Image (tube, rainbow, N blue to C red):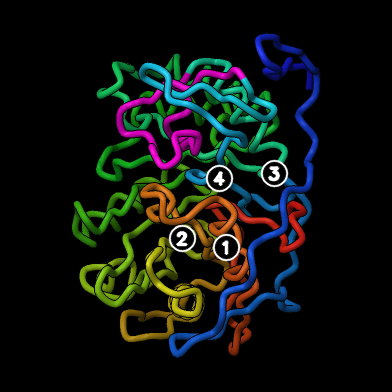
């Protein structure tokens, strides 16, 4: 790799010619306690063999919402100026729809909207956490509100830039109704998509029949070249994830037609306890892998994965959870055990994680 990366140091910049090395971070907060909803696991079970970096395309290491630029800041005009730490002097404009609690916690599907120096700081932080995958969207979040007009050329340039930093590109596209468009075709033909998330919280805006039909079309187009992910909401009343609650329990009741090609990007309710999140994760794995549960039928999909994709993002967005605690929750989910050998271990994370001692996974 021969790309230059720029690091801010006060008012100056320094170029280096390699992806930033993985570095340890602060130890995680104290473990959560088990409760009436479920047991909290804190040690990886024997079946959870974490693969080496970049070796398993379905074992995800990413954080689309929680990575926070370290250091203090002051509001200045329509943004914040970093006043301490390695990024001292960096100005981060506040974009419409961005996180304000804190404004230095940057959502990756919006990163392309920021100035280059902010992009470089955020990419550096992701690389140093040992994250293999970088989540983006060809319709960047809140782009129209911020005056950004997307195009195949712009997204090709952005995906290439993410690749040049050594990331696998995870395209999480919100519109699952659309057919294969020019933008997606361009990125696929150029080999610029490593994982494709087909829709965001799809049960909120389309029927199960519509979604399954669109998923079949996308599966036929991709033909196993890259993994596909499905993403649903979490139940607000019972605080459980897919497939609990209507209409989630009507979506993908039979996973077997997509075995090994489509995977679950599990969203959990951030207000649920750690025990309840762990129980929900196990129920989802039973549903996908072994067709266990009231909402499941068919033989199951033993080769499909369940990824702890979105766990504390909403709480982080509203300032009720920081990056450190979000990382703790995802570690506890990775440690989830199984009572049935047909159930696969959790296949990575999309909302940030690290080991209890602060080292990268």
Q: Quadrant of the C terminus?
A: bottom right
Q: Quadrant of the N terminus?
A: top right
Circles 2, 3 touching at the beta carbon (< 8 Å)? no
Residue 15 rendering spot, x and y as whole percentages: 76, 13
Circles 2, 4 touching at the beta carbon (< 8 Å)? no
Q: Earlier in the sequence, mark 4 or mark 1?
A: 4
In this picture, is 281 found above or below 153?
below
Q: Secondary structure at mark 1?
A: helix
Q: Earlier in the sequence, mark 4 or mark 3?
A: 3
Residue for badge 2: 311
Q: Measuring 53% from the left and 17% from the top, which residue is drawn there?
A: 157
Q: Nearer the viewer, mark 4 or mark 3?
A: 3
Circles 1, 2 touching at the beta carbon (< 8 Å)? yes
Residue for badge 4: 226
Residue 94 rendering spot, x and y as whole percentages: 39, 25
Looking at the picture, tell me which residue is in the foreground, 89 or 34. Answer: 89
Spatial CA distance of label 2 from label 4 is 24 Å
Q: Which mark is residue 115?
A: none
Q: Earlier in the sequence, mark 2 or mark 4?
A: 4
Residue for badge 1: 330
Q: Secondary structure at mark 3?
A: loop
Looking at the picture, tell me which residue is in the foreground, 175 or 135. Answer: 135
Q: Earlier in the sequence, mark 2 or mark 3?
A: 3
- Reply yes or no: does residue 301 show up in magenta: no
Q: Earlier in the sequence, mark 1 or mark 2?
A: 2
Range of the magenta residues? 89-114
Spatial CA distance of label 2 from label 3 is 18 Å
Residue for badge 3: 129
């Amino acid at each position: 790799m021969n790309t230059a990366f720029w690091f801010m140091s006060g008012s100056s910049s320094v170029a280096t010619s390699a992806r930033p090395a993985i570095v340890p971070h602060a130890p995680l907060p104290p473990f959560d306690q088990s409760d009436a909803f479920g047991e909290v696991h804190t040690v990886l079970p024997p079946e959870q063999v974490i693969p080496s970096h970049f070796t398993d395309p379905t074992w995800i290491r990413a954080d689309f919402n929680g990575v926070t630029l370290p250091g203090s800041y002051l509001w200045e005009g329509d943004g914040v100026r970093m006043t301490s730490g390695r990024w001292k002097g960096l100005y981060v404009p506040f974009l419409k729809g961005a996180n304000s609690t804190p404004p230095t916690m940057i959502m990756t599907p919006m990163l392309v909207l920021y100035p280059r120096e902010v992009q470089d700081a955020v990419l550096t932080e992701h690389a140093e956490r040992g994250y293999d995958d970088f989540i983006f969207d060809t319709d960047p979040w809140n782009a129209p509100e911020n005056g950004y007009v997307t195009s195949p050329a712009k997204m090709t340039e952005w995906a290439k830039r993410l690749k040049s930093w050594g990331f696998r590109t995870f395209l999480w596209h919100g519109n699952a109704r659309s057919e294969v468009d020019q933008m997606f075709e361009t990125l696929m033909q150029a080999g610029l998509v490593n994982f494709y998330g087909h829709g965001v919280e799809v049960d909120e805006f389309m029927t199960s029949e519509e979604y399954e039909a669109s998923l079949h079309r996308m599966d036929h187009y991709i033909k196993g070249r890259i993994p596909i992910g499905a993403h649903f909401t979490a139940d607000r009343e019972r605080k459980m994830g897919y497939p609990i609650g209507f209409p989630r329990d009507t979506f993908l009741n039979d996973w077997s037609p997509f075995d090994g090609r489509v995977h679950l990007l599990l969203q959990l309710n951030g207000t649920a306890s750690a025990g309840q999140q762990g129980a929900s994760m196990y129920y989802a794995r039973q549903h996908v892998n072994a067709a266990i549960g009231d909402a499941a039928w068919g033989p199951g999909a033993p080769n499909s994965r369940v990824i702890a994709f979105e766990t504390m993002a909403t709480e982080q967005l509203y300032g009720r959870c920081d990056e450190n605690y979000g990382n703790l929750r995802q570690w506890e989910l990775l440690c989830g055990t199984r009572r049935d050998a047909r159930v696969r271990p959790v296949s990575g994370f999309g909302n940030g994680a690290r080991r209890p001692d602060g080292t990268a996974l």
